[in-house]
Structures are given as C-alpha cells and as structure tokens.
C-alpha cells in the first residue's frame, strides 16, 4: 500500500502540475489569440488608412494637375492679352502718326495751293502772260515741297521709333 500511495501521490502531483501547466498554457494561448486579434484589427486599420492615403494622394495629384493646367491657361491668356494690348498701342501710335502725317500733308498742300493761287493772282495783277518755264518752275517747287513733306514725315517716324525702342 505504501507503494501505491506513493504512486498515487506522484500521479496526483503530476496531474495537478499538468493541470496547472495546462491552465497556464491555455491562458497564454488566449493572451496570444487576443494579441493576434488586436494586431489583425490594427493591420486592417492600417490597410484602410493606406487606402485612404492613396486616394488622397491620387486626388491631390489630380488637383495639382488641374491647378497647373489652369495656371498655364491663365499665363497663355495673359500673354495673349499683352500681345493684343501691344498691337493696339502700336496701331494707336501708327494711327496717330498717320493722322499727323496726313494733317501736315494737308497743310503743306493747302499752303502750296495758296502760294500758287497767290502767284497766279500776282501774275494776273502784273499782267504777266502764261509762261511754260514758269509753270515748270512752279511744278518743280511743288515737287520740292512734297519731297520736304515726305522727309519731314520720315524724320518724325524715325524719332517715334527711337522713342519706342528707348521705352521698350
């Protein structure tokens, strides 16, 4: 009996130790399962965050591309607007110069016509007859007047171009 009590005691101790070890292992297994489960949840959250970050990045790229295109269009429109303004200013200057040229030309022609009329009147008063040489001289004088007028206009245009180049 002693032997069997000893065996029983050893079996009982071994059984108790085994049960305790089993409980410890079971508790540790449950802790590991809980840790794995929480890490899986974290991993799932991280996947969702990554997906939303990718969407945000994609949206930002699309927005940036749109902003760049919009800026390019504004720059193009501004350049075109400036070109048109320059062209308009150029046309205004040309128109002004053309108008000044035409006014000077009209004044010179008017003065020339007055000079011819005055000369004819003087000839008639003096009783001078028509003289072809004198008429040719008048025509030559007229040509010199037109030449002087053209030279004055060219000088004016040169000065305006020099002023424009200095301003540019």
Image (cartoon, rainbow, N blue to C red):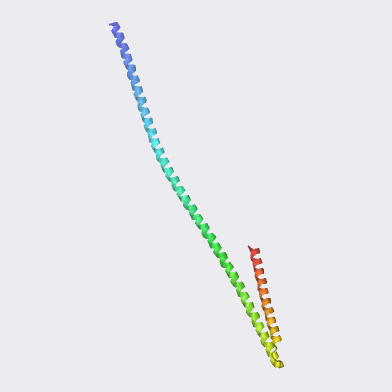
Given residues 43 and 100, the one toward you in this image is 100
Question: Residue lying furthest left in this view?
Answer: 1
Depicted 1 relative to depicted 77: above or below = above
- Is 86 left, or right, of 19 in this rendering? right
Given residues 24 and 29, the one toward you in this image is 29
User: Residue 42 lies in what quarter of the image?
Assistant: top left
Depicted 78 relative to depicted 64: above or below = below
Q: Position of residue 142 (x, y in %)?
A: 67, 81
Q: Position of residue 50 (x, y in %)?
A: 42, 40
Quarter of the figure that contains the C terminus: bottom right
- Is 5 left, or right, of 39 in this rendering? left
Residue at (66% x, 80% y) in the render? 108
Quarter of the figure that contains the N terminus: top left
User: Residue 39 lies in what quarter of the image?
Assistant: top left
Depicted 88 relative to depicted 145: above or below = above
Depicted 1 relative to depicted 112: above or below = above
Residue at (66% x, 78% y) in the render? 146
């Amino acid at each position: 009996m002693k032997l069997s009590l000893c065996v029983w005691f050893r079996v009982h101790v071994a059984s108790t130790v085994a049960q305790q070890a089993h409980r410890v292992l079971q508790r540790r297994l449950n802790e590991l399962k809980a840790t794995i489960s929480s890490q899986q949840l974290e991993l799932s959250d991280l996947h969702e965050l990554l997906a939303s970050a990718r969407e945000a990045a994609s949206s930002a790229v699309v927005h940036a591309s749109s902003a760049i295109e919009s800026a390019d269009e504004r720059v193009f429109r501004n350049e075109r607007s400036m070109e048109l303004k320059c062209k308009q200013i150029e046309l205004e200057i040309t128109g002004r110069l053309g108008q000044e040229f035409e006014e000077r030309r009209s004044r010179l022609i008017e003065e020339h016509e007055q000079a011819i009329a005055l000369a004819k009147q003087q000839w008639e008063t003096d009783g001078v007859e028509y003289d072809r040489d004198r008429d040719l001289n008048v025509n030559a004088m007229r040509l010199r007047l037109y030449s002087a007028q053209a030279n004055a206009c060219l000088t004016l245009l040169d000065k305006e171009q020099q002023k424009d180049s200095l301003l540019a």
